[in-house]
Image (cartoon, rainbow, N blue to C red):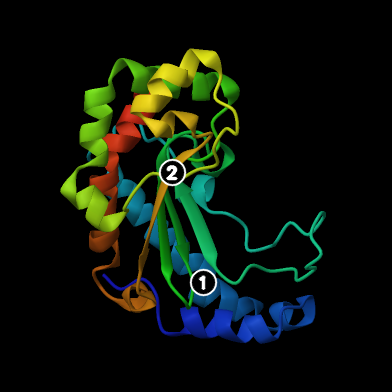
Amino acid sequence: MQYFTEDFSAFFKELASNNNKDWFHANKKRYQASIKEPFEVFVGAMIQQIQIYDRDLEIGPKDCILRINRDIRFSTDKSPYNLHYTAFISRGGRKDKSIPGIFLRLSPEMIGIMGGCFGPSKEQLHKIRTNIRNNPAAFQKLLENRDFVEKFGEIKGDKMKRIPKEWQETFEKEPLIANKQFYFVAEESPGLITSNVLVDELMHYWKIMRPINEFLTKAIS
């Protein structure tokens, strides 16, 4: 099924040159028809597909979709609108980025795809590190999975500058123990946005990231 027309990318390209409230309000109906409404349908379709495998996913599209408005309170860039549309599909939705899920960003330049644990609390981080220390072989097997390496490469994240004593031995065997985040990213061509296999292709990514997401989810639960 095709969810978006070519106007999805065209809208954001024009917004990039007219990032102000007057232009946006003059194009509000176009935004509703080409961006907001089809994106809700698309995210709803993703949720339905994921629920086949994850019965604990009890959310709707509005729980997952981030606003187009930028938070400009602490930014030197006062442009009011993002130049992409974003959703975080997980059991916690957009309000809890500590729960692993699939993060999707659609823009004229690319489709961004992210999984893993982006914002764990100190308690959750301790649990993840403990799970890695207690299950090093299982964790390494997930990292070395051929499909994961091909699509996502490796786990990323900010790292501790100093390794506490309790983690030093594990760090020597598994440097990722120093991470303060455990996420991974991939990109797809923007041409996929208007294709009729968009959900199928993104579900392929979801299935590849699922084992690591489940490893992290089990740790923080």
SS for callout 2: strand
Q: Residues within 10 Å of mark 2 (few under 14, many from 20)?
A: many
Q: CA distance from mark 2 to mark 1?
A: 27 Å
Q: Which residue is label 2 attached to?
A: 183
Numbered mark located on residue 35 in the image: 1
Circle 1: residue type: Ile
- From the top left corner, tell me how far across and down residue 69 is, in percent: 69, 62
Q: Residues within 10 Å of mark 1 (few under 14, many from 20)?
A: many
Going 53% across and 65% down the picture, which residue do you hit? 85
Judged from this view, the residue extending furthest toward the left is 146
The quadrant where residue 72 appears: bottom right
Q: Quadrant of the N terminus?
A: bottom left
In terms of depth relative to the viewer, which is nearer, 203 or 113? 113
- From the top left corner, tell me how far across and down residue 29 is, in percent: 61, 78
Nearer-N-terminus badge (2/1): 1
- From the top left corner, tell me how far across and down residue 76 is, in percent: 81, 64
Residue 121 in sight: yes
SS for callout 1: helix
Q: Quadrant of the C terminus?
A: top left
Circle 2: residue type: Tyr
Going 59% across and 28% down the picture, which residue do you hit? 162
